[in-house]
Image: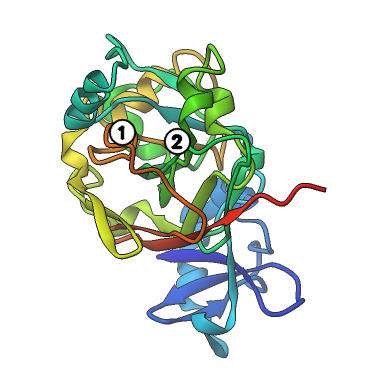
Amino acid sequence: MKIARYRRGDGPTRLGRVDGDHLVDISSVPGVGVSLRAILPELPALAPAIRAAEGNAVPLADVVLEAPVDSPQKYLGIGMNYKEHAEEARAAGIPIPTSQLWFNKQVSCIIGPHGDIVKPAISDQLDYEIELAVVIGRPCRHVAVEDARSVIAGYLVANDVSVRDWLQKRSPTFTLGKSFDTHGPLGPWLTTDDEIADPLDLRMTLSVNGDVRQDWRTDDMIYDVYEQIAYLTQVMTLQPGDVLATGTPAGIGAPTGRFLAVGDVVRAEIEGLGAIENRVVAEVRP
């Protein structure tokens, strides 16, 4: 099941079930409403009614898709979690961590699957990172690796946009370089966990203006999705709607200096989850 947050014209944001190139409004299904985050703990119970919902199918081309999760409490990312990417980071002078390396992306960076990425005027080192994003479905703490899949509501495509000079040089943590406004495109919708046979075996590709820069599979993770959840929940309670970006494969711009420029179109796609596509625009200051 795929659930999108969308709006038509100047209308309010609603929830819809994606069926091919159309969606069916589900906001009027009893217990659903317009907040995906609010219904995540009850999503398994609501699923039969959502799947059975009928109504006028709206073409996806006629709506604006918004970030699938409204107002998540946390957006966390793990650094250098793909084997080949860790090696290219080492080549770029970035030390490889000996344990899971987590950072915050401030939730104010999140935009929808087709929103514009703003290139900051203060940097020419704007980079891309395709990532499989996991959405937590229920409050959880001290989750065992073997139980971790049970707390996953579903998956998104993420582009962990990074400002490299702020990431590696201007701040002692990753947070600032990962949290510029608009640098968290997510989408295109939530694909529920039951639709994905194995999240550790998905092809992921990222292209810039049609030129493929990243083409890898999620089986190259150093710490898999379940190990990540177990590690984090030793420290904190993960809440419904929390987003975990699970690492990027090789092919980022930093090692070659092929950074994003104004006018570039970045398309990130993951097998079974769909694609997000965002244009880079110049920052306009008041």
Q: Compute the Cα span from label 1 to label 2.
A: 9 Å
Q: Is residue 234 left or right of residue 175?
A: left
Residue to which mark 2 is pinned: 244
Residue to which mark 1 is pinned: 225
Q: Is residue 190 above or below residue 144?
A: below
Give the image location of residue 263, x and y in percent: 49, 61
| Amino acid type indicated by mark 1 | Val
Of residues 223 and 131, which is closer to you in this image? 131
Of residues 274 and 180, which is closer to you in this image? 180
Secondary element under disc 2, as helix, strand or loop, is strand
Q: Is residue 279 left or right of residue 1?
A: right
Give the image location of residue 237, x and y in percent: 55, 23
Give the image location of residue 133, x and y in percent: 40, 43
Q: Is residue 209 left or right of residue 278?
A: left
* Residue displayed at 24% across by 41% down: 251
Farthest bottom residue in view: 56
Q: Is residue 72 left or right of residue 196?
A: right
